[in-house]
Image: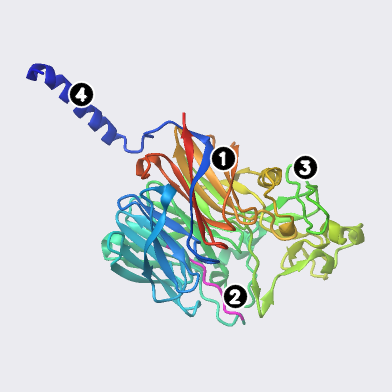
Amino acid sequence: MKLKHLLPVVILAMLAACSKDDHPDQPTVNEDPATFAEIGTLDIGEAGAAEISAYDPATKRLFVVNNGGRNRIDVVDMADPTKMKVIDSIPTNSGAVNSVSVNNGKLAAAIEALDKQQPGKVTVYNTSNYQEIKTIATGALPDMVTFSPDGNYILTANEGEPNATYTNDPLGSVSVISVKDNYSVVNIDFSSFASQQTALMQKGLRVFGPNASFAQDMEPEYVTVSPDSKTAWVTLQENNAIAKIDLTTKTATDIFPLGFKDYNTDANAIDPSDKDNGVTFGKWPVKGMYQPDAIAVLQTGAIPYLFTVNEGDVREYDAFKEADRIKNIALDPTAFPNAAELKVDAKLGRLNITKTLGDADGDGLYETLYSFGARSFSVWNGSNGSLIYDSKNELEVKANAAGYYDDARSDDKGVEAEGVALGQVGNKNIAFIGMERADAVAVYDVSIPNAPSFLQILKSGDAPEGVLFVAAKDSPTGKSLLIVSSEDDGVLKVYTPKTL
């Protein structure tokens, strides 16, 4: 070909390359998000062996928490997801590894102290050779770790749980580690909100630990960061709230109490008994505390949409147990004239509720019943904490229809939505909702965040904890991947959608 004929071809190729580089997030394949199917599975151990995982696109490796014996991080070759294999492990020589996150060749691991009430740590490793880069002290019990999207910060949610006798209750906190400032750290607690305790509790915040200060009682669970890396939100699970953090000033700016969910409606109908000879969803005079575990943010326009999975959690210690079954609770006869009937095991008798709420006048008779979790996922306005959407009882209805609903958990927290991941599949925004007790993941189209649309449900391993999305542009296959790690059987499963 003559040069004058070759030049246009070269120029067009250069323009196409530039166009691709200018839009690195543009989907490279047209995928159908309703067609995810399993393509690979790997068993790396027993209970505790596959709780959370993080993927490094540069090395095509998956880093998986493994506390099933010797605490470590297993390294899985993901070059071919249909033939995954463990190729190495990183010993941590410390307490349990609770979470991992990857960014730009760095692996951050949140590791609790052997004495869980003492400060934990984040250790940063090189994803290529596993060499330690830095270890940074955090608050007590770092339960989750994540990088900010720009890679400039590592954040941990430090739960700060008390000891069994409730005589040592560390502050709940969020550690903000500045990667470019030699990993300097600022630990943010919530003591500045103590003067607002009464007003916040009236809106649904829970502060109830024995002899605990406001800051001690807050227990951060999970963190998500805005796309511009300027704002973080952290779930305060036991406290039934979400806190907002300004990463520029490194201060907590808001606590959003989440209120309660009314199960006495058709749309929110639940099955509250494990002794009712089947699964029957009905209206009951009970409320649910949202108590979210995982959280993820989707920014569209001016509104940051916060997606939470409302698992619920119970404080159970030698010195303090907040839960009891309704059949053991004295009910106010005015509020519950049919108390004897409600206390039957096949009705409400078996349902676990908190004893810390519901007896407003302190006479020992409960006028309102509050159960743990909301058996759903929700969408909240990240600017003001208002509820935008709740899935009501759809997760449980879909799980039951698929044959995945575990009736033995009806008296506790139902399907226990615990993990969430957001990602773009084709041209749609998709949410993946992991349900610990249904051993399944629900897939939703959330392109319209205030009106999510159910697409499908996928069977997972036993008790899915980690729900990880890998975008097509980062995937070893060039297609979107969903990676689910399950803590009770140590099984990893990988799913991918069909191409249109």
Q: Nearer the viewer, mark 2 or mark 4?
A: 4
Residue 381 can be seen in this image: no
User: Which residue does the image show at 62% across and 78% down from the upper left?
Assistant: 211
Decide if residue 37 is on the left or right side of residue 351. Answer: left
The dot on residue 12 is 4
Residue drawn at x 52%, y 62% is 490
The label on residue 444 is 1
Few, some or many residues within 10 Å of mark 2 (<14, 14–19, 20+): some
Q: Could you tell me residue 351's position as x and y percent?
A: 77, 61
The amino acid beneath tag 4 is Leu
Quarter location, residue 107: bottom left
Q: Front-most of 74 and 43? A: 43
Can you identify the residue that label 2 sits on?
A: 212
Camera-near label (3 vs 1) is 1
Q: How many marks?
A: 4
Q: Are marks 2 and 3 in contact (CB under 8 Å)?
A: no
Q: Are marks 2 and 1 in contact (CB under 8 Å)?
A: no
In 3D space, how far apart are the residues under numbered discs 2 and 3 (Cα atoms)?
A: 38 Å
Considering the whole magenta stretch, tell me its main secondary structure: loop
| Residue 390 against residue 100 in the figure, above or below | above
Q: Amino acid at mark 2?
A: Ala
Q: Is residue 12 left or right of residue 57?
A: left
Tell me, yes or no, if residue 6 can be seen here: yes
Q: Residue at x 61, y 80 (%)?
A: 164
Q: CA distance from mark 3 to mark 4?
A: 59 Å
- In the rendered structure, are the residues bearing label 3 and label 1 in contact, judged by CB atoms less than 8 Å apart? no
- The residue labelled by disc 3 is 266
